[in-house]
Every structure is written in C-alpha cells, then in structure tokens.
C-alpha cells in the first residue's frame, strides 16, 4: 500500500471515529461538561472558600488544570477502548488486519479518534472553567504538548485494554480500578507537598502525577515535580504503549478467531 493509500485509510478511520462520538454528543461531550461544573461548584466555590490558598493560588485556580486533564484522560481512553472492542466484538477488526493497511495506520487511526474526543472535551471543560477561575496560561507550549501527549497516551492505553478484553465488562475494569484511583491520587485536588515524605515518594510512582503537574505548570507556573522530568515520563509512557499496541496488532492475539 502506497503513501497516498495509507493517508486515505488513515483519514477514513479518523473521520469514522469522529463521526461516531459527534453523532451521540449528548453522551460523549455533554456529560463531562456537566460533571466538571459540579466539581467547580463543590470544590472550587464551596469547599475552596474554606481551604483558602493552595500553593499561593485560589483553590479553584489550583484544581482547574487537574480537572481539565482528568477529563482528557478519561475520554481519550474510553473512546478508543469502546470503539476498538466494538470492532473486535463484531469481527470488523479482522477485516482491517487482513487488509493491506499497515498496523501503524490502524493504530494511528483509532488513537487519533480518541485524541479528538479527549481534546474536544478538554476544550469544553477549559471554556467552562473560565466561569469559575481567573488563571492565565504561563507556558502555552507546555500546555499544548502535555495535553496532546497525554491524550495520545491514554488513547493508546484504551486500545491495549480493548485488545485484552473478552467482554464489555472488561472495558470498565481498568477505568474503575486503575484510572480513577490514579487520577484522584495524582495531585488533581492537592499538592503532594502536603503529604508526609513517604507518601510523597509513593505518589511519584503514579504516572498521572507527572501529567497533572506538567499541565498545571503550563497554566500556573508551579509544579510538585521537575517539569522536564514530567515531560520525559509522559514521552516514555507514550512511546512504550505505542510500541505495545503495534506488537499486539502484529501478533493478532485476541483479535483473530
């Protein structure tokens, strides 16, 4: 398959994925916005007034980057996990694997679709946050690179989960028992400087911590970890999962009847 044919295949897959979540926008785009409004009202306005300042910023300003990142993570992941497993369940993925389409094009098509939904939700949540916060973007390039890489990382993770999943229930296991704890313990609602030294060390084993703090640094200029270390960790996990995704597609394990 030539370069032009690969590009057409990629465009087709991305267009299909984007149409998929836009067609049911009341289920894919609207609920995250409503959920984040509740977070801002409860944590930013009600609880935040009692907490006061966090690292020199209003609490609502402090948690806003983490809430945006949380929305990007969950939606990038869930879009690819559900879409890829749906293709596998309906045996459509077998047609893709036996076609001349290279595995990296298949991977890129699904991942880009997941990124599109994650970034769309992130943009909606960012716009919503403007009604509750007054933060400024200190480092736009870091914000952009961090959110794109994070969306790519978790979209790829969603594909990996879908490859191993045998039932639709398996799709919900990782978000419930892995993603949610990692996100809530990833410094979204607090600075790890408030924790005892041992728990600070434990928190640094959480990859989400680096994504949240790099993103927060882009907005507020503060971070609990070295921002370049955080960016390096994000790149490392993204490359590692992309490699794993290609290996799984090549092997065909759990994909072919």
Image (cartoon, rainbow, N blue to C red):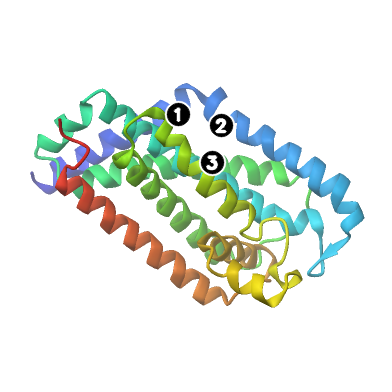
Helix, strand or loop at mark 2: loop
Cβ atoms at labels 1 and 3 below 8 Å apart: no
Q: Indicate which disc, 2 or 3, sits on the residue closer to the N terminus.
A: 2
* Residue at the spot 16% in from the left edge and 31% down from the top edge: 94
Cβ atoms at labels 2 and 3 below 8 Å apart: no
Please say whether residue 134 is visible from this viewpoint.
Answer: no
Residue assigned mark 1: 21
Asked if residue 49 is positioned above or below residue 234 in the image, the reply reads: above
What label does residue 176 carry, if any? Answer: 3
Task: Check disc 2: other Cα within 10 Å, few if <14, some if 14-19, many if 20+.
Answer: many
Alpha carbons under labels 2 and 1: distance apart: 8 Å
- From the viewer's perspective, is 247 left or right of 133? left
When asked about the image quadrant of residue 198, the answer is bottom right
Asked if residue 142 is positioned above or below residue 127 in the image, the reply reads: below
Asked if residue 95 is positioned above or below residue 173 in the image, the reply reads: above
Nearest to the eye among marks 2 and 3: give it: 3
Residue 83, percent from left and from top: 36, 32
Alpha carbons under labels 1 and 3: distance apart: 21 Å
Please say whether residue 25 is visible from this viewpoint.
Answer: yes
Residue assigned mark 2: 29
Nearest to the eye among marks 1 and 3: give it: 3
When asked about the image quadrant of residue 86, the answer is top left
Alpha carbons under labels 2 and 3: distance apart: 20 Å
Cβ atoms at labels 2 and 1 below 8 Å apart: yes
Q: In which quadrant is the C terminus drawn?
A: top left
């Amino acid at each position: 398959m030539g370069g032009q044919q690969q590009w057409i295949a990629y465009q087709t897959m991305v267009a299909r994925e984007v149409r998929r979540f836009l067609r049911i926008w009341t289920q894919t785009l609207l609920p995250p916005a409503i959920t984040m409004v509740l977070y801002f009202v409860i944590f930013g306005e009600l609880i935040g007034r009692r907490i006061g300042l966090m690292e020199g910023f209003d609490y609502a300003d402090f948690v806003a980057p983490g809430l945006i990142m949380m929305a990007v993570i969950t939606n990038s992941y869930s879009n690819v996990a559900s879409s890829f497993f749906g293709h596998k369940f309906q045996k459509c993925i077998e047609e893709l694997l036996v076609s001349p389409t290279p595995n990296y094009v298949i991977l890129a098509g699904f991942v880009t679709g997941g990124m599109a939904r994650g970034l769309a939700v992130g943009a909606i949540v960012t716009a919503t946050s403007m009604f509750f916060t007054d933060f400024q973007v200190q480092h736009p390039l870091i914000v952009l690179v961090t959110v794109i890489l994070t969306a790519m990382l978790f979209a790829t993770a969603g594909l990996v989960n879908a490859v191993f999943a045998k039932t639709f229930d398996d799709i919900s296991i990782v978000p419930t028992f892995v993603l949610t704890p990692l996100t809530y313990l990833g410094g979204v609602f607090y600075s790890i400087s408030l924790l005892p030294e041992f728990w600070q060390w434990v928190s640094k084993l959480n990859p989400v911590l680096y994504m949240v703090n790099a993103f927060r640094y882009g907005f507020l200029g503060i971070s609990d970890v070295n921002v370049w270390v955080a960016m390096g960790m994000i790149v490392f996990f993204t490359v590692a999962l992309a490699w794993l995704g290609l290996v799984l597609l090549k092997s065909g394990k759990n994909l072919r009847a």
